[in-house]
Amino acid sequence: MAKTWDATSEHLLRDLAPQVLGTVARRFRDFASAEDAVQEAMIAAFRQWPQEGIPDNPRGWLIQVASRRMTDQARSEIARRERETTVAREAENVTPTFDSQPDMDTDDTLILLFMCCHPALTTSSSIALTLRAVGGLTTAEIANAFLVPEATMAQRISRAKQGIKASGVPFRLPSPQARAEQLPAVLHVLYLIFNEGYVSSIGPFLQRLDLAREAIRLTRGLLNLLRENGEVAGLLALMLLTDARRAARTGPDEELIPLDKQDRCLWDRAEIAEGTGLLAAALSKGSVGLYQLQAAIAAVHDEAMRAEDTDWPQILALYELLKRTSPSPMVTLNHAIAAAMVHGPAKGLALLQTLDCDTRFAGHYRLAAVRGHLLEMVGDFQDAIKHYRIAAAQTTSIPEQNYLIKQAARLAET
């Protein structure tokens, strides 16, 4: 019996989109056209399901509609392109149904993930394309994550699609050697998808649970494929240890609650236990990487039952190691916060000055927000207010904007 359309149905469509795209792309061997076909299938679902109900096999329904579109397109070009002729003939020999089909229950998302990170593409293009095709982020969200204009990101994604098409990459998991080469880009993609879900860069909601959950699901799948890889385990541990705080991060009106003000009784202890277990097993293998170090920092935060119990010297030591092994503007920013908590806000402010000349980060709202916080700790309320307001003007996240405005208003009243 078909299910009725409700508030969760749009999330269902979003979750199914990368799985359907993976199946259609594998079957028809044309990524760009498959994405167009899946988008048309999604539009059809949005139009029909609210009136007719959700099919018993919604994934199969979407695959059928998208496959029909692909078959029609292949038929129309049969005289010009031999490849489309072959695809159309193969498709004609298969009669899809809503209830059963050989590959309806096969999740090709992981294959799609590796395909988008193919060596034929640059790393930045691979990440952008995967965020679009697998993560379901909009072009604006991806541009925000990369700190580039939206038009630039749109061009990058378009070129990436053409690169996939020109490469002729087969739709299957790469060899073990190729997986190892592509793995850093794949992990970076999953990390960015999770971050966008944990702190949404645009819009009225602080968190996008669908993206965070999809990133965790994909990373679990990757760990099942690469069980002995410590960095995959470290990334999953980082996601779980961070996601464990989700319920405490917002108030009833979607307002942001900072880490030191959160009700830690709301933290998910099962996720924390799983994350720390994964991290311990990964660290025991002897090789420590970027995601394991970040997971270790998250674990130290999660171990503190009260904010004042946080082991900031240990966090500072981990950030110093992270700066040496995997330097980045965000690592420098967080290192400055840890240094301020251990050595005083003046030390943190001095470390922030190195970011002022970094063109990748100089205009980022988090730099202004952290500077405002440290200036408040010093007692320089006027400059703190100024930087809170600068940060509020720079962010496109409404909950973060509201929080920063309130911080400035609070100081203005003192």
Image (spheres, rainbow, N blue to C red):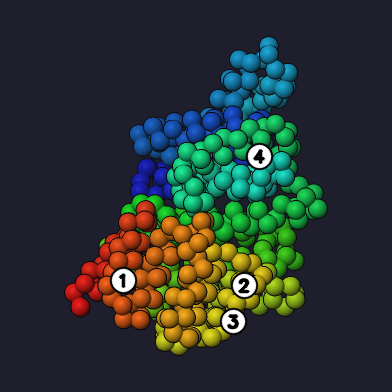
In front: label 4 or label 1: 1
Of the residues under marks 3 and 1, which one precedes in the sequence? Answer: 3
- Marks 4/1: CA distance? 60 Å
Task: Name the residue type under label 3.
Answer: Ala
Q: Is residue 382 visible?
A: yes
Picture disc at residue 383: 1
Of the residues under marks 2 and 1, which one precedes in the sequence? Answer: 2
Task: Name the residue type under label 4.
Answer: Asp
Q: Residue furthest left?
A: 413
Residue 189, x across and y down, in percent: 59, 53
- Marks 2/4: CA distance? 43 Å
Image height of 1 relative to 245, above or below: above
Of the residues under marks 3 and 2, which one precedes in the sequence? Answer: 3
Please tell me how crowded label 1 is: few (under 14), some (14-19), or many (20+) other residues with Cα within 10 Å: some
Task: Name the residue type under label 2.
Answer: Leu
Residue 309, x across and y down, in percent: 45, 88
- Residue ID for mark 4: 103
- Residue ID for mark 3: 317
- Residue ID for mark 2: 322
Please tell me how crowded label 3 is: few (under 14), some (14-19), or many (20+) other residues with Cα within 10 Å: some
In front: label 2 or label 1: 1
Q: Is residue 67 left or right of residue 397?
A: right
